[in-house]
Amino acid sequence: MSVCGIAIACILIQGANCYVPVSRSTFTNPFVQRTTNNNRSKSSLSKSILTAANLSQQEDDTTVDVQPMLFNGPTLPLELEPVAGATLSELGLDICIAPSTIAPSQLGLYIRVAENTESVTLPEMTLLCGYSREGTFESSPKNSGDKTVGFIIPSSQTAVFYERQLMSVMDALEYAAVTNGNGSCGLFGHEMYQQQQQDSGDDYDVDIVVQDDTDIERYYVPEMVNRVLSEEEVKAEDAFSIQNFGQYSNDLAFDVNDPPTNENDYASRSAQNNILQLVWRMEYKPDEGGGINCLVPSWPVTVLSQDVMFVNTEEFMEVGDTLWVEILGSTESALAATADL
């Protein structure tokens, strides 16, 4: 069985000019709203300051009139120091890895407003950091650590990064089909079906369905977080990279002593506590014989899941990600997994 579901050429190609790439920039966003305070001083991060210029983000020319969430996460205790950190100067934020406040004996991901800035407001889908540049794909999430994430695309409008641009997976498939010449492109681990829209003539919807094949290696296992770092590695300036920070985020909606009871309970807790989500970076894989051209996942990155306003100028606060859902593909599966905790 092919692990790459075919995308029909007639839905993807309607002429050479059917796709116009979005504009892009290097880790900048035109909707960053920042209030500065040049009189405030702050000590710099005690560990290495790393560059964030390795990643890029889409610019958008549309706005949504939505009140941003005021971020208020668990505060990093003063007696605990960051293990590594970076200043995202374009976003007006400091980001760091430090011992987690909610996951004993584990690290967590923290954010605060950068020096000389009183507040920062960022829109949903703002790119913060990579999740894990180094990792391997496995066929099962079992026994692979609680930071493993599944490549599961629920709809044609799911956001992905392709050619360093943020777009829907359907736009990515169209773009790949056009730019790579033969007019069709499939999606790894998924099947796609055309459905003609009612009273729409030649217009079609495309349904994306996860392939039911347990041998497909769709679960991404980050490399660093699943092994114990030596003292020398922790102290080394190059032990951590902005491309790998996201794997240290924890799901703040889950408490092993008081897990959510149902999907609505989890959704409510997650909306209040988690502000991060993952987006997959995609690559084009040409037909190498016996298969089809295909978009395949390379590695995930961490973005904001909603519009957020940051005002924590002095203290680092821990940020959360919907990791249980990322691992298993649905809230229902994630909740069922807690039965064994």
Image (cartoon, rainbow, N blue to C red):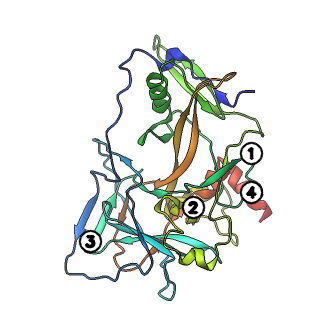
Question: Can residue 91 be seen from the camera position used here?
Answer: yes
Q: Does label 1 or label 4 sit earlier along the sequence?
A: 1
Q: Which residue is mark 1?
A: 139
As drawn, the residue found furthest toward the bottom would be 79
Image quarter (top left, top right, bottom left or bottom right) of the N terminus: top right
Q: Residues within 10 Å of mark 3 (few under 14, many from 20)?
A: some
Q: Nearer the viewer, mark 4 or mark 3?
A: 3
Name the kind of residue labelled 1 in the image.
Ser
Q: Secondary structure at mark 3?
A: strand
Name the kind of residue labelled 2 in the image.
Gln
As drawn, the residue found furthest toward the left would be 38
Q: CA distance from mark 2 to mark 3?
A: 27 Å
Q: Give above or below for 144 relative to 50.
A: above
Name the kind of residue labelled 4 in the image.
Ala
Q: CA distance from mark 4 to mark 2?
A: 20 Å
Residue 260 left/right relative to 213:
left
Is the Cβ of the residue at disc 4 closer than 8 Å to that at disc 2?
A: no
Which numbered marker is on residue 175? none
Question: Can residue 101 be seen from the camera position used here?
Answer: no
Residue at the (38%, 21%) spot, across then down: 18
Q: Nearer the viewer, mark 2 or mark 3?
A: 2
Q: Does label 4 or label 3 sit earlier along the sequence?
A: 3
Q: Which residue is mark 3?
A: 117
